[in-house]
Amino acid sequence: MTTKITSARPAAGPRKGSRRRPPASSATTVGRPGFAWALPAAVFFALFAITPLIMVAVLSFMSWDGLGSPEFVGMDNWSRLMDDPVMLNSVWLTLLLTVLGVAIQTPLSIVLGVWAAGHQRNRAVLSVIYFIPLLLSATAVSVLWRALLDPNFGIPADAAWLFGDGNLFGEQATAIGVLAFVSTWQFTPFHTLIYQGAARAIPQVLYQAAEIDGAGRYRQFFHITLPQLRNAMITSMILMIVGGLTTFETVLILTQGGPGTDTTISAYYMYDKAFKSFDFGTGSAIALVLVIAATIISLVVVKVSGYDKMRSTMEGSS
Amino acid sequence: MKTRARLPRLVACGATLALTVTLAACGGGDGGASADDGKIHVLVYGDATNKVEKKLVDTFNKTSDVKVVLDTIPGADYQKKLQTIISTPQAPDVFFNWGGGSIKPFVKADLLLPLDGFIEKNPDLENKFLPSVFNNAVVDGKPYGVPMRGTQPVLLFHNKPVLADAGVEPPKTWDELLDAVEKLKDAGVTPIALGGGDIWPTQMWFQYLFDRIAGPELLANALKGDKSAWESADSKKALGVIKELVDAGAFGKNYDSVKYTNGGSVQLLASGKAGFELMGSWYYSQQLTDHKAFAEKGLGYSTFPTVKGGKGDPANTAGNTNNYYSVLKKTKHPEAVAEFLKLMYSDEFVKEQLAIGNLPTTTNTDKFIDTASNPEYARFQYDLVADAPSFQLSWDQAYPQKSSSDLHKAIQQFFNGQLDADGFIKAMQALPTE
Amino acid sequence: MRRRPHYLAGAGSIFWLIVVGLPLYVMIAATLRTRQDYAENGPVSIPDSFTLDNYTGAFDSGFDQYFFNTLVVTACVIGIVLLLVPPLAYAIVRSRGRTTSAIFRLFLLGLAIPAQAVIVPMFYLISEAGLYDNLLGVILPTAAFCLPMSALILSGAMRDISPELYEAMAMDGASPRRMFFQLVLPLSRGGLSTIVVFSALQAWNGFLFPLVLTQSDSTKVVTLGLYNFQTEHGIDIPGLLGAVVLSMVPILLVYLFARRALVQGLMGVGGK
């Protein structure tokens, strides 16, 4: 409730004043850390993550197979990519899988997270089990699910009414379905934990007040719980989007981009170009597209949600 | 106040930065971990055969002044890692490969040492190996590899009781196979088990049928860059035959969801739900560990059927000819390497390989073959390989590694109907051959 | 709690338990049965044999050395993350400077860099630095790729600290440094344990950096050892899964003991 009031205030008041609130102004300048605190981490990160990224950017304008020295080829890799039907298709598939991931995992992990936030003993025990998939490596997850979904000896053999002839990996629609399901299985626990934490942080007063007003359980969920989980949702969604754009291990082990190129998402296509066809130039170009796309999307989400301004709202609300 | 508070931090992070730089500089001094430590680095594909390789290295190190170090890379990523390091100072001296296309790019990049110098001094490095196997590591007329593991021809395996119940004999000709497919379908089993999810088992059908119908020349020409090979009447005929088999329902409907590598297709044959499976000779030991009773009593095998009117010799075979050791030009110890390679035809090597179920391709293998765990099976394979006029290397190994991804896509898409014959021909013509 | 039980939620939770539990059951069951039993009866069946060979087999193939290496990598990565991220997050939350804001954006960008994309330049960087086939060469990039997410998590947790506490300390004339050690660190313990678990997971399960940046047996980590179970033609799924289960035991222990702190830390990520 309080949050709403403060966030409405800047529009009403003078713009500058909203950032530097008069009573706190002395405190805001005194005892604030300088950017030097952030510097060691930034330098380290620049050295081991940004430097290789810049090298990737340079490589995207070169032709190189890993042997001999790279040759500068201008926009060749880029113009070939623009005309490559597999690339265009992979962008579409990436978006589809990312959207599917967000659409399935968000409601699921909100419900599970809110449920697990309760302090009952059985919930605590079950939450421990729910968390385990997160501990498994991608290899293990894919080996497990490929075995479980074997058309002759896995679940489909016993549930023909649901799976038909069990050709889950032979058709595009079902192969995509399997990929979406397996990443849901693997990553929902993590997002559940985020929501569980956030749900426990909701002040009980809000629910007590609502109960006095006679609001039912579902009304409480939609009018108190959901709005209070807004920041958790933003964080979780950014992570899902970035994860969706960059995951490829599930594809690598479960479908190898097949049948044909039916599940070749961009991250897998990058791997395919760089490490199977040893065309590091084109692979680098695809990698760069992915990095740029993921950055733009997360920056947009951060801007729209005001996540980076959160400290001012936080200070105002308390 | 602000600046004063900030100063210590600046110093601290300056120190961190300096530390990092020093660290990098110090490291730079000793110039890479594995380069130039006075040893021979041998890089191999990591799997169960490594224990034989380790033993040979120990044998060698007992008498040699220059020591050999064995480095293994987990299987699935071997090629990726190799390509990354081979032109750097971290490259090994000797490395495992599949011959054919897997070393061609390295030869072109002038990284490998032709072995004719070694062979001139010691002709046994060529004479002690079966020619059809040795020749698969010859590039542009020069030998670049010495066979160092076992041969793995592809055979047509079957479930004896299932075939007997359906009134089917192991097929000698293509027509008999088609007939068997119909009878097995009537008996309610999947005629042929296929791990299509792995794609390379599907490729085996292409390899054999193209060899039987068009002869080994078609692929040899295609690999030389002759794109018209794929448009030839023989090529189209082979594609037609494959299509006919798939459309007849020989592989059932869900083969693309079945994998060999998770035991799916292996179990399909062992449990009697399928009649045949086309697979490399390692299949026998796989069945023996997973389905012992079946492997001992119910597992039968035969050579790939002949095709009427085909140009290929029916005695030709296909599969993994062997693996090879190739030598990098930059090695500082060529004499010691030559000595090490001699071990690849030693009696110790042959006995150790046979003991773990591999079938070496040296001329002295014959002598020890009765020590194999299943002498009858070992003899069958050895004679097959020794008598074969041509041993077709798996396509994805005959082509350079960089073609393998597109090659696999084309094979899977033609098999499941996403590509027609013309589409397949175009895809094959587009593959880089060097 | 004071409320009546929620039947719909109960049913849903049981459904999810099956979805999560079935594969876990299959995994555990597979590791405790013989290879032959698994192959003949299929993954979903009830085992009719019992063996520990799948676990002892993992140890026989050199896993003790691999475990030790992984332990070293994990400990060092956690160390670097704990050294670098708290001051970073503190600056992100409390600093008003434009540079800090730019640095924060840099780390947001870092979230989106797939390790696959930079692996080739990384190889050259590490081998130029002379760190190839050296555990340090694995530790540094792994730690670097843990930073963005850890910074996001920890700054979320630090935002939870009430500004009044800072103000109170500022009244006493506390320097940023004193606030950091006396106020921020003690109050963000939950967030700290979250980033420890997060980076431990990353380091423990890391595959790509060790694969490309190491070579000999003496620097091999567990995940690479796991891959040796997946050979080209031989299939040993119970053996593979046995190694997988072994490899997750240590991290499961960390999780069980640090669970409470972890959940509290994640509250910070979610904000309020």
Image: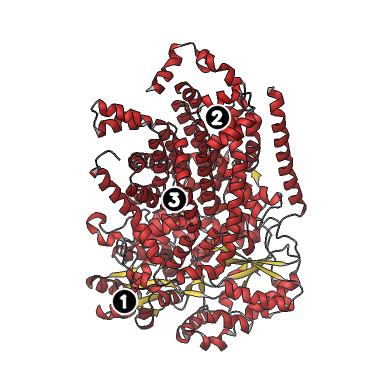
Tell me the residue at 56%/33% (across/down).
C184
Callouts 1 and 2 in the same chain:
no
Observer able to see residue C106: no
Q: Chain of mark 3?
A: A
Q: Distance from label 1 to label 2 (Cα)?
A: 77 Å
Q: Amino acid at mark 1?
A: Glu
> What residue lies at 43% left-to-right and 70% top-to-bottom?
B208
Residue B176 shows which numbered tag? 1
Identify the secondary structure beneath mark 1.
helix
Q: Nearer the viewer, mark 3 or mark 1?
A: 3
Give the residue type that dot 2 points to. Val
Identify whether A152 is placed above or below B133.
above
* In the depicted structure, whether residue C202 falls above or below residue B237: above
Around disc 3, counting alpha carbons within 10 Å, would you say few (fewer than 14), some (14 to 19), or many (20 or more)? some
* Mark 3 lies on residue: A134
Any part of residue A278 in sight: yes
Quadrant hosting residue C87: top right
Instruction: State the residue in front, B130 or A265.
Output: A265
Q: Which mark is residue C93?
A: 2
Q: Residue at x 26, y 73 (%)?
A: B184
Residue A187 in picture, x, y percent from top left: 41, 46
Mark 3–mark 1 distance (CA, rounded to whole Å): 52 Å
The type of colouring in the image is: secondary structure
**C111 vs B150, nearest the viewer:** C111
